[in-house]
Image (cartoon, rainbow, N blue to C red):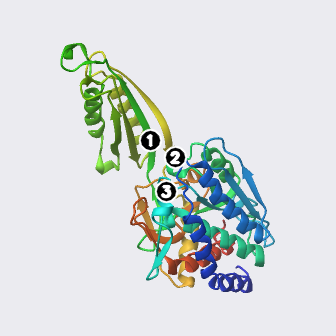
Amino acid sequence: MPNQATESDITGWLATQQDAMIALLREMVDIDSGSYNKPGIDAVGAVVSRFLAGQNIPVETIAQQKHGDCLRAVVACDGPQGSVGGNAGGNIVLMGHRDTVFPDGEAARRPFTITDGIATGPGVADMKAGLVMNCFVLAAFAKFGGAPAPLLGLFTGDEEIGSPEGRAVIEAEARRARVVFNSEPGRVSGNVVTGRKGGVFMVMRITGKAAHSGTSFADGISAIEELARKTLAIHALTDLDRGVTLNVGLISGGQSVNTVAPWAEGQIDLRYVAPADREDVMARIGAIIDRAFLPGTRAELTVKGEFLPLTQTPAAKRLFEIYVSAAADTGFKTDGEFTGGCADSGFTAGVGTPTICAVGPVGGKAHSPDEFLRVDSLVPRAQACARAVLRLQQAGL
């Protein structure tokens, strides 16, 4: 059993930190940090590093070439060592991403605001509130100790585009971790996430032949028409009963309104539940790309990013049960949900590490101007996370 005095100290200190949490969250939200804005993402990282340095927590920067750097903050273990599980001595990872989906200028247009206990602003729930929560949980253990293993705060910078650079860092940390708490926003219901779909993000590029659409129409081969035909064929692969969805969500192409289009491009989003479905659907997409509906067109497919599904193993179920108990003792009820959204938790689960997702503060309407956060969930979600960390031993984790 965890040390009750330590649990009381940690949760009691967190109970006094709501105003400080809000101040840190405001600073993060008011910085533009879209996935391709490396300086902005790194500026949010500087906020994280400055806070943790103030708590005497060392932070290592793992530089990334194109996207936001990864930050690795460690709170050494001074609690009871060992585990009855197979990953004794591994780190306890608190994970979150600093990038958002919003364009530059959004923070100035919609700065952090609180109205009637509801906070708004770009990335306020997804997932800057989770970053703040992780910072304060790390600070609490730095002050009072008691964790059954070293605590690792992992702050990445490219999750919203499939973690093209961050994935390698995440998987490396997960392989030497005993458990992972991913602080994506808690569901509007208050639930955590115990299952997620996998996702593949692709671009199909079509090459046709330009011609004047009035005087030489028959000489042209329309890449846009080929794109349209391929889009219909790809959308037809959707199978809702299997949880497989295909969406061509962005298209572009053409040279001018009076030119038969010499090129066109479509961006494809595939979501799936079972790994076998990924292989099946990717093969079918490949066949569509290889087929020329209009003779003379050529097409190529490029995978731009990918998420693995999050599935609940027996060990992950024990982690979930510990969290549910910790939440109940904190004063709120939670359960597990499945979602079609993807997250970095799929990578940690994919290497076999027990993972629980969406343990962050409660919010909703992510990726939209209506995104919101329940301010009154900041402290309780931090307390529940800390309690769950303290109780890992009793679950054999």
| Residue 55 falls in image quadrant | bottom right
- In the rendered image, residue 250, in percent from the top left (x then y), is placed at 36, 41
- In the rendered image, residue 373, in percent from the top left (x then y), is placed at 47, 72
Q: Which residue is mark 1?
A: 201
Which is more toward the observer, 115 or 287? Answer: 115
- In the rendered image, residue 110, in percent from the top left (x then y), is placed at 46, 65
- In the rendered image, residue 228, in percent from the top left (x then y), is placed at 26, 32
Q: Secondary structure at mark 1?
A: strand
Amino acid type, label 3:
Gly
Marks 1/3: CA distance? 26 Å
| Residue 388 falls in image quadrant | bottom right
Amino acid type, label 1:
Phe
Q: Which residue is mark 3?
A: 105
Taking the spot 45% from the left edge, 63% from the top edge, the residue there is 109
Taking the spot 70% from the left edge, 70% from the top edge, the residue there is 138
- Mark 1 or 3: in front is 3
Which is more toward the observer, 106 or 174? Answer: 106
Question: Taking the image as drawn, is residue 85 in sight?
Answer: no
Amino acid type, label 2:
Gly
Q: Which residue is mark 2?
A: 162
The reply to whether the C-beta atoms of the residues labelled 1 and 2 are less than 8 Å apart is yes
